[in-house]
């Protein structure tokens, strides 16, 4: 694919903004880790070598204890299996465990002690455990995966609706514009939190139900922005030329106007992503978000607030949020500066 020279200049400008460029790399690495979370944080082993055969439990079928010589039918405890193999090294059997050999739902209790437990490198609880004995690192990593993909899907939903309606309002104007203005004004006055509370009291909000609810209210901001830009763009020469050539309104909007507003759309995207993460975390903190025991940063924040002596809970989730939101914000600032149309164009 051959890029436009202006696009190449914008990408070079973005790369020259070191803080944003390196933040983008960090963010890509974090999303990549989120996609392959099971390879780093999981109660299942990556590889098991037993009696000359290799097993890959992480993405394979469940293997019962009978498979490896135990006397139970439920899934193998691979941490105990690793300890068992270490006692008999002459057999040549071994287990390769993830860095954090726990899943976000698993309880790990110590006899005679009540959780939360502080960080322990010996037990591989690097950030300790929460109030019900679940590993904090596992809850953080899986919680990040849910939060980042929640915000990305919410971004797609909001932008799909907002860009379509906003560009139509700006292009056709008149009664169509006035009608949707009144709808947006009424819709923006509906108390969002009350709607969430009412729905959460009727049904348990799932991942996609929350996206649907938040998309009902999240498209308004981008709609106003695209409407304003479309009003300006529709009077430009390239739009008038397209009309003179007989292009339809839909083609002009989606093939000419929207691509020429891409700089604004891309600029707002990182800030919308951070807004989605904060919204989901806030709802989970208040108890109106994803149902327990779903891994959630908001739920960890609530635990940390209720147990201030367990500093590892609140400290870890606050650090993770600061790093994530700071990274996304730096990327947004760099994108906004790199895609600034005033740097590459001029108006007659």
Image: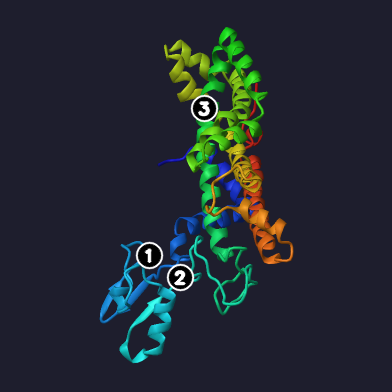
Label 2: few (<14), some or many (≥20) within 10 Å? some
Instruction: Give the mark nearest the N terminus, 1 or 2.
Output: 1
Name the residue furthest left.
Answer: 52
Quick check: 289 left or right of 106?
Answer: right
Q: Are marks 1 and 3 in contact (CB under 8 Å)?
A: no
Q: Which mark is residue 98?
A: 2
Where residue 177 sits, quadrant-wise, is top right
Q: In this view, does 183 lie above or below 154?
A: above
Name the residue furthest bottom.
Answer: 90
Q: Identify which residue is drawn at 54% across, 57% down.
A: 30
Residue 150 placement (x, y as % from top left): 52, 44
Q: In which quarter of the image is the N terminus?
A: top left
- Nearer the viewer's eye, disc 2 or disc 3? 2
Label 3: few (<14), some or many (≥20) within 10 Å? some
Nearest the viewer among 268 and 14 is 268
Q: Do the residues labelled 2 and 3 touch (CB within 8 Å)?
A: no
Instruction: Give the mark nearest the N terminus, 2 or 3.
Output: 2
Q: Name the residue under label 1.
A: 58
Instruction: Give the mark nearest the N terminus, 1 or 3.
Output: 1
Label 1: few (<14), some or many (≥20) within 10 Å? some
Q: Are marks 1 and 2 in contact (CB under 8 Å)?
A: yes
Where residue 121 sits, quadrant-wise, is bottom right
Q: Identify which residue is drawn at 66% across, 41% down.
A: 337
Name the residue furthest front.
Answer: 112
Q: Distance between the residues labelled 1 and 3?
A: 38 Å
- Nearer the viewer's eye, disc 1 or disc 3? 1
Q: Is mark 1 on a helix, strand or loop?
A: loop
Q: Quadrant of the C terminus?
A: top right
Q: Residue 161 carries which label?
A: 3
Q: What element carries label 3?
A: helix
Residue 175 placement (x, y as % from top left): 58, 7
């Amino acid at each position: 694919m051959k890029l436009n020279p202006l696009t190449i200049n914008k990408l070079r400008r973005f790369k020259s903004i070191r803080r944003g460029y390196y933040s983008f790399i960090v963010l890509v690495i974090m999303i990549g880790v989120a996609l392959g979370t099971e390879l780093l944080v999981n109660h299942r082993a990556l590889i098991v070598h037993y009696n000359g055969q290799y097993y890959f439990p992480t993405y394979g079928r469940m293997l019962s204890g009978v498979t490896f010589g135990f006397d139970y039918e439920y899934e193998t405890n691979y941490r105990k299996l690793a300890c068992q193999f270490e006692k008999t090294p002459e057999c040549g059997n071994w287990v390769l465990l993830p860095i954090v050999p726990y899943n976000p739902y698993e309880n790990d209790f110590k006899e005679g002690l009540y959780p939360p437990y502080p960080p322990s490198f010996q037990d591989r609880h690097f950030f300790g455990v929460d109030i019900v004995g679940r590993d904090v690192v596992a809850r953080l990593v899986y919680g990040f995966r849910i939060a980042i993909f929640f915000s990305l899907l919410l971004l797609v939903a909001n932008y799909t609706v907002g860009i379509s309606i906003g560009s139509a309002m700006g292009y056709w104007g008149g009664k169509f514009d006035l009608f949707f203005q009144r709808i947006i004004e009424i819709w923006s006055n509906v108390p969002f939190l009350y709607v969430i509370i009412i729905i959460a009291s009727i049904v348990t909000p799932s991942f996609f139900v929350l996206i649907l609810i938040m998309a009902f209210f999240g498209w308004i901001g981008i709609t106003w922005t695209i409407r304003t830009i479309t009003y300006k763009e529709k009077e430009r020469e390239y739009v008038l030329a397209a009309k003179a050539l007989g292009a339809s309104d839909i083609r002009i909007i989606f093939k000419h106007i929207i691509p020429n507003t891409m700089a604004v759309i891309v600029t707002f995207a990182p800030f919308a992503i951070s807004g989605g993460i904060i919204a989901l975390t806030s709802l989970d903190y208040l108890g109106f978000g994803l149902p327990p025991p779903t891994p959630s940063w908001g739920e960890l924040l609530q635990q940390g607030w209720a147990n201030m002596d367990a500093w590892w809970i609140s400290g870890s989730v606050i650090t993770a949020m600061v790093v994530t939101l700071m990274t996304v914000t730096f990327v947004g600032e760099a994108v906004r500066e790199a895609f600034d149309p005033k740097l590459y164009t001029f108006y007659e």
